[in-house]
Image (tube, rainbow, N blue to C red):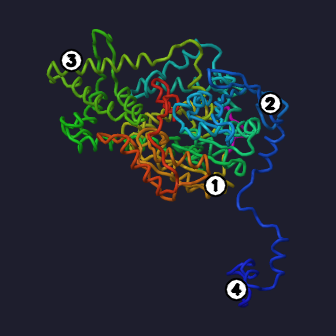
Amino acid sequence: MPRAIRSLTATGIAGLVLAGSAVWPAAAAAATPQPPAYDRTSAAEARRVDRVPTPKLDWYACYDYAECATMRLPLDYDNPKGATTEVALLRVKARDQQHRIGSLFLNPGGPGGSGTSIALAAPYFLGDDLLDRFDIVGVDPRGIAASDNVKCFPSVKDQTRAYAGLNVAFPFTKAEEKAYVAASKAVGKGCSTTGKPLTGAASTAEVARDMDVLRRAVGDKKLSYLGFSYGTALGQYYANMFPDRFRTLVVDGVLNPNAWIGQGKARNQLQETRLRSADGAYRALHEILARCAKAGAEKCALASAGDPADAYETVAQRLRKKPLVVDDPDAGQFTVSYADFVGATLGNLYDPSGWQYIVDLTGELLVLTDPAAPASDRAEARTAVAQRAAEARRQRGYDFPYDNGLETFLTVDCTDAYHPKSADAWPALSASEDKRAPYFGRAWAWGTAPCARNTWTVRDEDAFTGPFNRTTAAPVLVVGNYWDPATNYQGAVSSARLLPNSRLLSSDSWGHTAYGTSACVTGAVDAYLLQGTLPARGTLCTGDAQPFQDEPAATRAKASKSDLARAGAPGRGEPKRLPPVVAPLPAVGTLTVR
């Protein structure tokens, strides 16, 4: 290669011009179109959404401080003048309208979580600056809550009969497995027949398309988005389908979209085998029990019985052999099974302070399952467990009216993703998951049994399956939590690697998702949403609440603010906590939601 050409390659045309070389290379550069630095929305996706006229939203006052609206959108974006489905929105207007940035769309996850509910709850958990500067907008995705509902059975009676085998946290005995498989087949068939056409038109891709149309409807040129849990899948779908149409996009508690769908040979695997949610749950439980042992009996009573991990396994073994039947004068008779114990553990791992419940329950059941325990200890433990059982009963729903919560979850998951062919395979496959991730493998695996391909036959021909590695015009902030029991931290790591223009923010927070559990995370997310400022690469935040530590939250928040200052973003004081509506707990008797 001639020396002059080597020089041109090394320094670039602009370098030659600045050095006083001939002007013609600069003119040639100006005349030659340069490839964009980021990917564009594909012609096919642009055609689908852009030919839908911008909806005119007729907002009305609702819930004292919010505004509500409904809008009909195409059931099939390939036929925009055909059938429609109604979608519900709620917004809480920015408190400082003069300095309003735009709208911030929220999604709480699930799938099946209500976007209108999380928007209504926004004043209780979002940072004040976000509430000042953004209209907070929540959309109930297709089939969910206040939008037109998915309904897989003609009546509550038919639904109840189909669901009969699902009334356990997860099946463990052979009889339970047989009943669960039969019920899963009934649900899959119901949603593939009676549930149509909506079950075939409510994939994550359709919701992303709806969100792009509604972005225009609220008057925003670019989308601002904050998604939690499964809402991170929706966020990544939008980022890859519309890579040049968002201003800021945050995903917290992250599902890797390729693992969610099942690409290539992984299509025949359980979704749990790909996502490894159970691994995250087991890792969090193991860490709690290890910290209990380190803290000692003074701070963790379970440590007085020896190794807390051994105590937990002892309770599990006893309940596997025989469920515990408790007679209480106030609560009456109730049964605690092995699945109930694991399900309660998993549910409380969602809570940043749930570690206390877990070690207390383990200690109580350790006593109640031991015939040799002193009578006084048994009486005290029975009262405590009875109170927990009574609370669980109060939280239980009722048969009327028609509750489609399970069906909304499945409509998205079964239509988006690939799953094994037959529900008959789930007993063996879920047992294998338990070997890899003790206790929680079965709990996570069984939730998708109705998705078996030979019973869940409805599909969305316009579902999006990738690629998920588009270079976006604006960066994506990916937030991962070390101890998340539902969305394994590795999902955040791998998703950040997929997206070239992304930044990973890590936290050692407890519970499911990190926003609101760490002043560091909350401040970093708020700074990005407000100003587009990303935290420094490699930033690791500190969770405000840590098991068996007495350090005041204010002190920990101060430390987190220092971490954030080093990341180049403004810190915040004690963050607000996400209300229960934001981080749904596992639904005992049906499935576990993300």
Q: Residue at x 45, y 44 (%)?
A: 519
Residue furthest to the bottom in view is 3
Q: Main secondary structure of the magenta part?
A: loop
Disc 4 or 2, which lies upstream in sequence?
A: 4
Q: Give the vertical position of 60 relative to 449 (above or below).
A: above
Disc 2 or 1, which lies upstream in sequence?
A: 2
Tell me the kind of residue under disc 3. Answer: Ala
Mark 3 is surrounded, within 10 Å at the Cα level, by few (under 14), some (14 to 19) or many (20 or more) other residues, namely few
Mark 4, residue position: 6
Mark 1 is surrounded, within 10 Å at the Cα level, by few (under 14), some (14 to 19) or many (20 or more) other residues, namely some
Tell me the kind of residue under disc 1. Answer: Asn
Tell me the kind of residue under disc 4. Answer: Arg
- In this view, the residue in front, 277 or 41, is 41
Q: Disc 4 and disc 2: Cα gap in Å?
A: 58 Å
Q: Nearer the viewer, mark 4 or mark 1?
A: 4
| Residue 530 in the figure: left or right of residue 330 | right
Q: Nearer the viewer, mark 2 or mark 3?
A: 2
Mark 3, residue position: 379
Disc 2 or 3, which lies upstream in sequence?
A: 2
SS for dot 4: helix
In the image, is residue 221 part of the stretch drawn in magenta? no
Q: Which residues are magenta?
A: 457-464
Mark 1, residue position: 469
Q: Disc 4 and disc 3: Cα gap in Å?
A: 86 Å
* Mark carried by residue 56: 2
SS for dot 2: loop
Residue 509, horizontal then vertical, whole percent: 42, 44
Mark 2 is surrounded, within 10 Å at the Cα level, by few (under 14), some (14 to 19) or many (20 or more) other residues, namely few
Q: Residue at x 68, y 35 (%)?
A: 459
Residue 409 seen in render: no
Tell me where residue 553 sits by quadrant: top left
In the image, is residue 458 part of the stretch drawn in magenta? yes
